[in-house]
Image: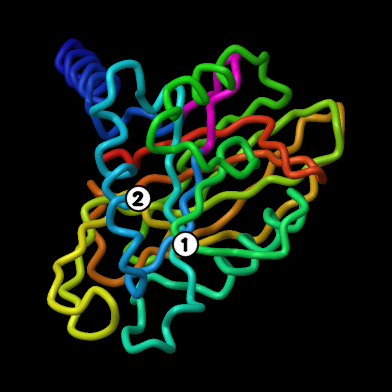
Amino acid sequence: MKHLLFIVAVQFAWLTSSPAAEVCSKSSPSYTIALLELYTSEGCSSCPPADKTVKQLYQTPGLTADNVIPLALHVDYWDYIGWKDPYAQPLHTERQNYLSALSGSRTIYTPEFFIGGLEFRNWRSDLLRAVKTINRQPALASIDIKLEKNVTNKLTLQIDTKTSQASELHYVLVEQGLSSSVSAGENKGETLQHDAVARDWGTVIKLTPELQNTSLVHLNIPINSKQKNLSVVAFVQNPQGKILQALSLPLCN
């Protein structure tokens, strides 16, 4: 019996200390994290500087994943000029049109930034101030993300949200460290580097105000993606386009 008790104790200690026993989850803070959306294209010669801004975002003193989350959405409307962007999706173009319409604009272009759901043209000079302004706002929604299952080509996640107003939950699979050798179009001959690229966009979920909303959701993992480069971004947005809260969960090893 003593031997049995010792074995059970050792097994329990291993389970509680093993990295495999750790829960892969994250909760949003009481302040608002800024969501920085970039609409870009490999077929646009003006876009590489904006892509570089996203890639080097966390090299800026004062900017971390705890106060700003980048999301690069490659659009498809430049594919016709000679180079088909491998990361472009019609859904990204639709979202850009939606945000632009909310801001009163009839024109979309690349590169175009939005921060907190609003068009942001001063991204070269005013990014830190814009992020800090959003961070000073109390969060109008809470988000909790928990990775339930990670198989070869699909993620299953539980996302809990709560907000006081009518809104929607968006969740996106994001990949870092991507590159393309462009052989046609405006960037012909260039090797383009990308981070924070939106790879799979989940079905939008309508949230009920004042209630805890629990959603079991799925995201598809692209072929040849490396898990260490993947994360899930979730955000809550109201009908006026304002981002009430955002959160990023890197996939756990």
Q: Is residue 113 left or right of residue 118?
A: left
Magenta-highlighted residues: 26-35
In which quadrant is the N terminus drawn? top left
Residue drawn at the location 56% of the way across and 44% of the way down: 114
Label annotation for residue 196: none
Pinpoint residue 151: horizontal percent, then vertical percent: 36, 59
Pinpoint residue 89: horizontal percent, then vertical percent: 49, 73
- In depth, the one of 221 and 32 nearer the eye is 32
Residue drawn at the location 48% of the way across and 37% of the way down: 122
Pinpoint residue 8: horizontal percent, then vertical percent: 25, 20
| Residue 155 visible (yes or no) | no
Q: Amino acid at mark 1?
A: Thr
Q: Amino acid at mark 2?
A: Ala
Q: Which residue is mark 2?
A: 50
SS for dot 2: helix
Q: Which residue is mark 1?
A: 110
Disc 2/disc 1 C-alpha distance (Å): 9 Å
Residue 53 occupies quadrant: top left
Pinpoint residue 186: horizontal percent, then vertical percent: 28, 77
Give the class, few, some or many, for how many residues have Cα within 10 Å of label 2's Cα (few <14, many ≥20). many
In which quadrant is the C terminus drawn? top left
Residue drawn at the location 19% of the way across and 79% of the way down: 188
Q: Is residue 137 above or below residue 232?
A: above
Residue drawn at the location 35% of the way across and 83% of the way down: 84
Kindly indicate whether the residue at mark 1 contacts the one at mark 2 (C-beta within 8 angstroms): yes
SS for dot 1: loop
| Secondary structure predominantly adopted by residues drawn in magenta | loop
Question: How many numbered markers are drawn?
Answer: 2
- In depth, the one of 101 and 86 nearer the eye is 101
| Residue 237 visible (yes or no) | yes
Q: Is residue 47 magenta?
A: no
Q: Is residue 1 left or right of residue 67?
A: left
